[in-house]
Amino acid sequence: MNGESFSDAVLVVLGHGTTQNPGSERPVFQHAAELRRRGIFRDVREAFWKQPPQVKDVLAGISAPRIFIVPLFISEGYFAGEVIPRELGFSTINDQPSTVHYCKPVGTHPRMTEVILARAKEVVEQFPFPRAPRPKGITLFIAGHGTEKNEQSRQSIDRQVALIRAREIYADVQAVFLDEDPRIRDCYLLAQTRNLVVVPFFMSDGLHTVEDIPVLLGEPERVVKERLAAGKPTWRNPSEKQGKLIWYSPAVGSALLLAEVILERVRETTLRAKL
């Protein structure tokens, strides 16, 4: 971290969380464990907005001169940009004077471009059937949630589309969404190539990524639920749908690089506080 000591600081990795889909919390625990292993901070804690351990309870149990909260969220949208900052009090923690820093979400960090490109490349290389297509024969889709509650929700995805499209690696790059247009099911109409790679720009392989998106891409809901119940992947790479071959990658949030992005968010926040 550029030589700066964080031995007096506690890092809180904050996820959205859910009580509806077991396993969605895994990236938070994954990256917190990795950063705890490195011994950079006095302590590293996991916290969530929608499930235990809830962030208010975690903060109440911390006594440290500095606390860094890094949202493991895709965008500065409705929750990370509005709800959580409004609901949390950052002045004192556990009646001890603390400087609490609420960092920017990891999903808007510039290095997320590397994560998306790595996910797209890895899934094709892992499943090169009948043979791996060249990138110029692929349309890359970045699949996000989207919401009409906050226009910033999709901005990080639109930005990644523009950045990757400018590199001219793929035949085309498009954004598709669960709750906004263009919809995920529209990818077959939007693609000008036979080969499609869909990268879910989500922080966890939870309900949306393992159930909703495969169904929207054309896999029968019954088959998805049967595979899920059997502990099998809910999408087979590649699958042929509507005359196209589709590769579907894991969510970006479990990529190993995310631990570095979390550290970058802490460093940036520290530099801004010194200005």
Image (cartoon, helix red, strand yellow):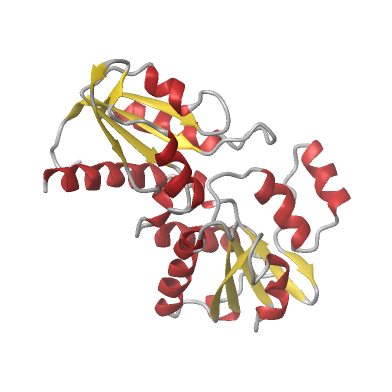
- Residue sticking out furthest to the bottom: 192
Quadrant of residue 101 within the rendered picture? top left
Instruction: Determine the residue positioned at 81% across, 37% down.
Output: 229
Q: Can the viewer see residue 129 in this picture?
A: no
Q: Quadrant of residue 130?
A: bottom right
Could you tell me residue 268's position as x and y percent?
23, 48
Residue 8 % position (x, y)? 20, 23
- Seen at 61% across and 70% down, the residue is 132
- Image mark count: 0
Image quadrant in which you'd find residue 31: top left
Question: x and y percent of residue 39 in the render?
Answer: 28, 26
Image-based side of 64 in relation to 16, left or right: left
Can residue 237 be seen in this snapshot? yes
Q: Is residue 41 above or below residue 260?
A: above
Observer-nearest residue: 199 or 143? 143
Q: Is residue 119 above or below residue 245?
A: above
The residue lying toward the viewer, choosing from 88 and 209, is: 88
* Image side of residue 229 versus residue 124, left or right: right
Image: 178 above or below 251? below
